Amino acid sequence: MSTKNHPLLEHTNGLSLEEVNGTIKVPKGKSFWRTLLAYSGPGALVAVGYMDPGNWSTSITGGQNFQYLLMSVILLSSLVAMLLQYMAAKLGIVTRMDLAQAIRARTSRSLGIVLWILTELAIMATDIAEVIGAAIALYLLFNIPLVIAVFITVFDVFLLLLLTKVGFRKIEAIVVCLIFVILFVFIYQVALSNPDWSNVLKGFVPTHETFADSPAIGGQTPLTGALGIIGATVMPHNLYLHSAVSQTRAIDHDDEEEVASAVRFTTWDSNIQLSLAFLVNALLLIMGVAVFKTGTVKDPSFFGLYEALSNPDTLSNGILGSVAKTGALSTLFAVALLASGQNSTITGTLTGQVIMEGFVHMRMPIWLRRLVTRLISVVPVLICVLLTRGSTVVEEHEALNNLMNNSQVFLAFALPFSMLPLLMMTNSSAEMGERFKNKWFVQLLGWVSVIGLTYLNLIGLPSQVEGFFGDTPSAAEIITADTIAYVLIAAVLALLVWTIVELYKGNKRVALATKEMEEDLSE
């Protein structure tokens, strides 16, 4: 258990999210649907990360540029997400450790600190997208100046404080409600657009054109569009979060059948909620194709999309145009953006607590954790807003959009260091036991997914670094960006080797300790 060292900082090495761990009772001997309802909730917290503001422009722009070609990328990303989240939830339920605790228990303190810093940067990068999304939503809905709106996003810490008082089950319910708000908005807008559903279905079948490096439309190729969608969809912090919140249900861990039941129903919950996230992302891409006339969205930022939904001339049919005149389409879009940002605020804070406790065994109050993370994330957004105040409106919008896109580069660094340990540990019978370790086909799919996503993230790194130099970098800037990218790739690969070696040794120690324990019990 934890021992208090300081009012605002505690040493901890106890249960994951100790305040809520095992606090939600689940019925025994009830119907499938009654039991599933009791386990429903953690999947929603995870699904939020797959439909946060960082996903919006990539999906809509992909639809504008390539019609339904990238629908298959959204589908494949969602299936990979389901596989990884299944492993994360199973790890938490079976081992009673979250992913950060499990990695730290099998690696050195120095590697634990490095991985903690890397994951913190990824969370902050996600938080930047949330700050931008929430601030722009406040500006669009209430005409609050952007600088003030950015500061207002800091005060969501009070919302979080309120939520911690109402209980974890109610937090899950609030998140589900916000997800349905987002879903309703996009279903309504797509329904009015009357898309070509036969072409939508054809788009779910990948072709050689899906990952082609030509043609280039609006500075984007199918390959870069696909990488953008993948990068915005599969995020490392969700794996840490799910391995922790899956432990909120109270089960008897000495009863193997009860553990198996928990894994089963948690997987159902996760897959249902991630299917909703897939639907949201698919609707976003369909919006890019069917709601707007092809090529009319010149500004893919949130400002540009809001303006496009207010302008009948950019919309694909008369029904949408008449609704746009009332301001309903653009207002609903801003409401969905605000809901998405608030959802991500809740889950981002929980994840931050999980990785801090797991990797460095430190805990701080949840409100302070949120305040520190948000203040750090606000700084680059404020600098961006202040530096562009004298610029044109379009330049201000582009600067914020570029900041959001460029911040996502940290996700490419952090993702392999959550996926690979997760796969190695859930493949191991020493960690999971023979019954719960990954089946051979899950291992195969896992290795294909992990290697494929790592490869795609790394080959997309040069273009992401080039993005820091603007839309039209010079030849010298491209060389500089590529050099930086290749150094970073080498650093990532070296750190991956270090992580694999330490995890392998850690697994060997666990296997040896398990064998010795079994021998002692048999004597």
Image (cartoon, rainbow, N blue to C red):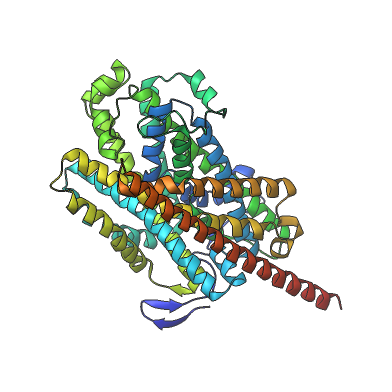
In the rendered image of this protein, does residue 510 appear above or below residue 40? below
Q: Nearer the viewer, residue 469 or 290?
A: 469
Residue 341 in view here? no
Which residue is situated farthest in the front direction here? 476
**Residue ID at (69%, 56%):** 427
The image quarter containing residue 32 is top right
x, y percent for residue 438: 70, 52
The image quarter containing residue 104 is bottom right
Q: Nearer the viewer, residue 35 or 228?
A: 228
Q: Nearer the viewer, residue 306 or 107?
A: 107
x, y percent for residue 112: 52, 70
Residue 158 in view here? yes
Q: How many marks?
A: 0
**Residue ID at (67%, 52%):** 261
Which residue is situated farthest in the right direction here? 523
x, y percent for residue 102: 59, 66
- Looking at the image, residue 222 sits to the left or right of residue 7; the answer is right
**Residue ID at (43%, 57%):** 122
Q: Nearer the viewer, residue 149 or 475?
A: 475
**Residue ID at (36%, 80%):** 7
In the rendered image of this protein, does residue 95 appear above or below residue 3? above
Which residue is situated farthest in the top direction here? 318
- Looking at the image, residue 367 sits to the left or right of residue 176; the answer is left
The image quarter containing residue 323 is top left
**If the image is split into quadrants, where does the C terminus sit?**
bottom right
x, y percent for residue 407: 36, 52
